[in-house]
Amino acid sequence: MAQTFLDSNELVLNMGPQHPSTHGVLRVILKLDGERVNGTECVVGYLHRGVEKIAENRTYQMFAPYVDRMDYVASISNGLGYVLAVEKLINVETTPRAQVVRVILTELNRIASHLLWLGTHALDVGAITPLFYTLREREEILKIFENYCGARLTTHAFRIGGLQYELYEGFEREVIAFCDWFMPKVAEYEELLTNNRIWRDRLVGVGILNAADCKRYGVTGPVLRAAGVKWDIRKALPYSGYEKYEFDIPVGTNADTYDRYLVRMEEMRQSIRIVRQAVGAIPEGPIMAKVPKVLKPPVGEAYVSIEAPKGELGYFIVSDGSINPYRLRVRPPSLINLQALDQMVKGALVADVVAIIGTLDIVLGEIDR
Amino acid sequence: MAAEPWDDDLTRALAQQFGNRVERYATYLGQKFLVAEMAAVRDIIEFLKLEAEFDYLVDLTAVDYPNRPKRFEVVYILYSFARNERVRIKCSVAESERPLSVACVHATADWMEREVFDMFGIEFAEHPDLKRLLMPDDWQGFPLRRDVSILAMDNRWVKENLGIESGQ
């Protein structure tokens, strides 16, 4: 009797799908031994909308707004990946002016995405203040988006071949003003968090995923860079003219949650650097390349990927020569990165699971598509 | 623009190792791909990982061609950090066939193969835990097959779990 009473049976704890720290509808089944996590199982799909099936039933242009609904905090990145993939298939390159504007908006979107991540991640581990700060700054970016295309989140800012809208009067001034105003704000977050005792205690040494494991699990983005791998698709396989801009790839050394925080903070500064260079060099000219009204890419297939805020976002499109994609596959960075969760939380405490889910920066809309 | 032949050190090394088990090496729009027989794919991926540093499986997916004798095409996209290049590997799979899982070579293939199983019904042999990823476990049918309409759904599941006659 005493034997069974003291038996260290695993306790199975269900976290989610309705749990604030899972950032959506993610269910994680935790196998616990006391406070220690022995293993996890993720259950995803609660937000599945069949985006890939929808693509097969829409024309190339009609499908473009749907991609914004995947990673809805970085919809401009989603849109950029999609239009680049279709442009590859039809072998069209967009105009220089459109390229530069795309870079500006995409980098602003990267900052917006990182800001939301920082605010919610801090909230998850108990720091409430940063959320109000980061949402305040994010608001300014969303205002720029709203002024540009009328939408704040699901923007549909780009079109296949270029841009839908010409820049509005005062765009450059607004973006530069934002850059000037934003840089001290990053220092402000760092002041609040970087040497904060509680913040460090919760993050340093938590959720380590080294470079070899990152590659095994196909993990990309800031998580891979925090493991010391200096790899960013903007540098490795440049697109949209990223080779013209000077910026650094921040890397970490300890591959833990704290390093991933530092990497993302630096990425925001680097994005500002890119935006400044781009705003100063917007060429004159048309915003749309010559693209047929009825789009029928030749039979064939292409895989195009970009460095989204979360990692490698890829589109694999198969064309059968008709107006609809024959098959469209999205390689979602959030889903692939989430797969490493099990490895990262093994041996950690229950409270760390929340920090580790936060540091992966997942968006369930993209995981489930 | 048609696909062009692909010939370099890598294809020669592969040809030496796998001979006629690889049917074709080509590039399309500057992207390299090879078409191999299904049974050789895992060996090729392992060879590329160990001998040519293709250590990152970017994506694994499938395309359905219901009119072909072997209706599915499974697509693997590999990347090498050291060489900074991507290759695609494609193989045809009949409805009754079971390709070998590559999860033992690249751990990331686990969920990708589950998604392909979920959406197309392709079963991967030797997969550690093959079950649906996105759809409910007891769902009937495979949504991304081309002969499944976008409006089609598992009415039994909808009735039992949502308590409504139809989702439409």
Image (cartoon, rainbow, N blue to C red):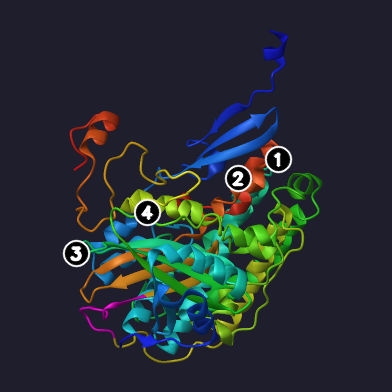
Separation (CA) of disc 1 from disc 3: 51 Å
Q: Position of residue A32 (x, y in %)?
A: 64, 31
**Foreground mark, 1 or 3?**
3
Separation (CA) of disc 1 from disc 4: 37 Å
Q: Position of residue A112 (x, y in %)?
A: 55, 62
Residue corresponding to mark 2: A342
Judge the density around disc 4: few (<14), some (14-19), many (≥20) Cα neighbours within 10 Å: some
Residue corresponding to mark 1: A348
Residue under mark 3: which chain is it in?
B
Q: Position of residue A39 (x, y in %)?
A: 62, 38
- Callout 3: SS: loop
Q: Is residue B28 above or below residue A215?
A: below
Quadrant of the rendering where the N terminus of chain B is positioned: bottom left
Q: Quadrant of residue B153?
A: top left
Separation (CA) of disc 2 from disc 3: 40 Å
Residue under mark 2: which chain is it in?
A
**Foreground mark, 4 or 2?**
4
Q: Position of residue A327 (x, y in %)?
A: 30, 65
Taking the spot 63% from the left edge, 52% from the top edge, the residue there is A359
Quick one: A62 or B74, which is closer to the camera? B74
Q: Is residue A17 above or below residue A265?
A: above
The answer to whether mark 3 and mark 4 are in CB contact below 8 A is: no
- Range drawn in magenta: A291-301
Tell me if I can see residue A109 in this picture. Answer: no
Q: Which mark is residue A108?
A: none
Q: Which mark is residue B67?
A: 3
**Foreground mark, 1 or 2?**
2
